[in-house]
Image (cartoon, rainbow, N blue to C red):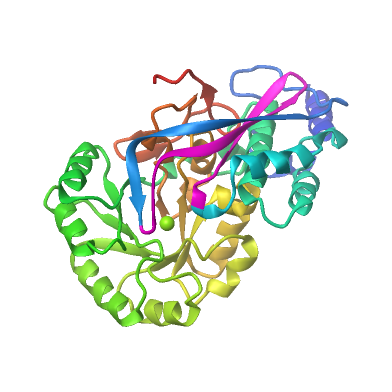
Amino acid sequence: MKHGRRNFLKSMGVASMATTLPLAACTTIDNKAPAVIGNGKMKLSFRPYELKLRHTFTVAGNSRDTTPVVLTEIKYEGFTGYGEASMPPYLGESQASVIGFLKKVDLEQFNDPFMLDDILEYVDSINEGNRAAKACVDIALHDLIGKLVNQPLYRLWGINPDNTPMTSFTIGIDSPEVVRMKTEEAARFRVLKVKLGGGNDREMINTVRSVTDVPIYVDVNQGWKEKHQALEMVHWLAEQGIEFVEQPLPKTAVDDMAWLTENSPLPIIADEAFQRLGDVAAFKGVYSGINIKLMKSTGLREAHKMITVARALEMKVMIGCMTETSCAVSAASQLSPLVDWADLDGNLLISNDIYEGMKVVDGKVTLNNLPGIGIKKIYPST
Ligand code: MG
């Protein structure tokens, strides 16, 4: 039996992981036989899908009712890993650009899905941009390897699923009547994220505060233009029980951001300014922390490295999402026990999810014990 297990690990290229993983990770949760890694080929397939938003969503500079995504599958030896690319318009990717990229991805040259470094380095080298397109391959690959060993990803990373954070629920810029209604609807969340930068900032906060006293995260989406006015507003927000402010100034205003962060009573978090792993070190001193999203980071593997680097630099870490199905949101949730703040509500904003995965229970991100990213397919209710 022991000999068999050793051969199994060796054949999967994970022998070195066995020294750091609990023994249980080498067997399976439900005593199913683990997959045998043979000479199979990975097959990538993809299709466009349009997410319908429950409410029109408005942030500084943008308003929309739908979000285009591309759903991917990687099949290997009878197992299927699921992935997703989400393309809110401001990211510069589209279903056409993602599908164009995925047509260039040849996974059939690899016969061992555990060779993540090799496979994802190849995928990253195909084009400079296309971060969401790269993410949908990365997510499907991680889902696949979790299914092959029949373990949730958090176990493969040694992450305690009990340490998941609360997730915020986002309130977009709107009239006081709509903001009040949305805040009342969000009563089951213990944290709210309020979008500002639309010219009615105090009205937005005062309206939310007239309904609830839960902690509030603020996201300005680069909507403030002048640093002294920004600092004055941050001081006012600190008095209203706000926890931090995300991307208050334009991403190009690096010196102004550094000044604001130095003088701010609240942590200042980079979102639009922050994309890849290589950006993290340069943000030390400019921002208090970073907002990691899989659609920017090219997926889970780089997101996990970003958390490590940010922690080494003593920076705060937030994990967020786009408007996404439970596929990409559940993938990000696997990393959420490692962060300070989570904004993982993208799947709750849509009416036609086709997956079921992470749940929000009493406001807390709650992981299941399904293998991989922890999702199963369902049929949309609308
Ligand atoms: Mg943001």
Q: Is residue 23 at least partly visible in the picture? A: no
Q: Quadrant of ligand 1?
A: bottom left
Estimate the x, y position of residue 165 in percent, counting from the top left.
39, 47
The answer to which image quadrant residue 101 occupies is top right
Q: Is residue 70 left or right of residue 336?
A: right
222 to 157, vertically: above or below:
below
Can you give x and y, in whole percent of width and height, for residue 97 in the image? 66, 45
Position of residue 263 relative to residue 123, above or below, is: below
Q: Residue at x 40, y 61 (%)?
A: 221
Q: Look at the image and say whether residue 87 sits in the magenta stretch.
A: yes
For this orientation, the residue located farthest to the left is: 210
- Between 9 and 226, the residue placed more toward the observer is 226
- Between 374 and 218, the one nearer to me in the picture: 218
Quick check: 188 above or below 43? below
Q: Position of residue 369 (x, y in %)?
A: 52, 28
Q: Which residues are magenta?
A: 60-89
